[in-house]
Amino acid sequence: MPSGLTRIYDRDMAAAGIPKRDERNRVMAVHALRVTFGTHLCAAGVPLRTAQAAMRHSKPALAANVYTDPKLLDVAGAMDTLPDLMPTPEAAPVRATS
């Protein structure tokens, strides 16, 4: 990280009125921008290998597990895209009668 970047970032955050800690008590630091970037890549459906390259990580696990905030992902929306596995009464097979 370039020398002085943290000091400049902290000054800019204060000038913008952004608190140093969020509601989950996480520190807002320069590195938090990488988490935001990784989370947005994941939420946009960018393949993990592509996110790994964009973030210049040596391992995909860094992009997936360290730099992605699962609380910000639309898990319910992802479940809604799955097919319905329970047949509806109209789709039930008709049996022959004798």
Image (cartoon, rainbow, N blue to C red):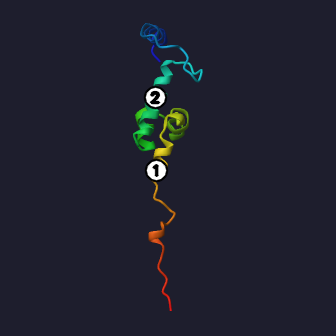
Q: Residue at x 45, y 15 (%)?
A: 2
Residue 19 appears in the rendering: yes
Badge 2 or badge 1: first in the primary sequence: 2
Q: Please indicate, yes or no, whether residue 56 appears anywhere in the rendered image.
A: no
> Quarter-wise, where is residue 13 in the image?
top left
Residue that appears at 50% across and 36% down: 63
Label for residue 36?
Answer: 2
The local crowd at label 1, few if under 14, some if 14 to 19, many if 20 or more residues have their Cα within 10 Å, is: few
Q: Eyeballing the image, is 56 above or below 81?
A: above
Q: Residues within 10 Å of mark 2 (few under 14, many from 20)?
A: some
For the residue pair 23 and 28, the one nearer the viewer reads as 23
Badge number at residue 28: none
Residue furthest to the bottom: 98
Q: Position of residue 47 (x, y in %)?
A: 42, 44
Q: Which amino acid, by three-letter code, is at mark 1?
A: Asp
Question: What residue would you read off at disc 1?
Answer: 80
Seen at 44% across and 70% down, the residue is 90
Q: Position of residue 40 (x, y in %)?
A: 42, 34
Cα–Cα gap, marks 2 and 1? 24 Å
Residue 21 left/right relative to 37: right
Q: Is residue 59 above or below residue 85?
A: above
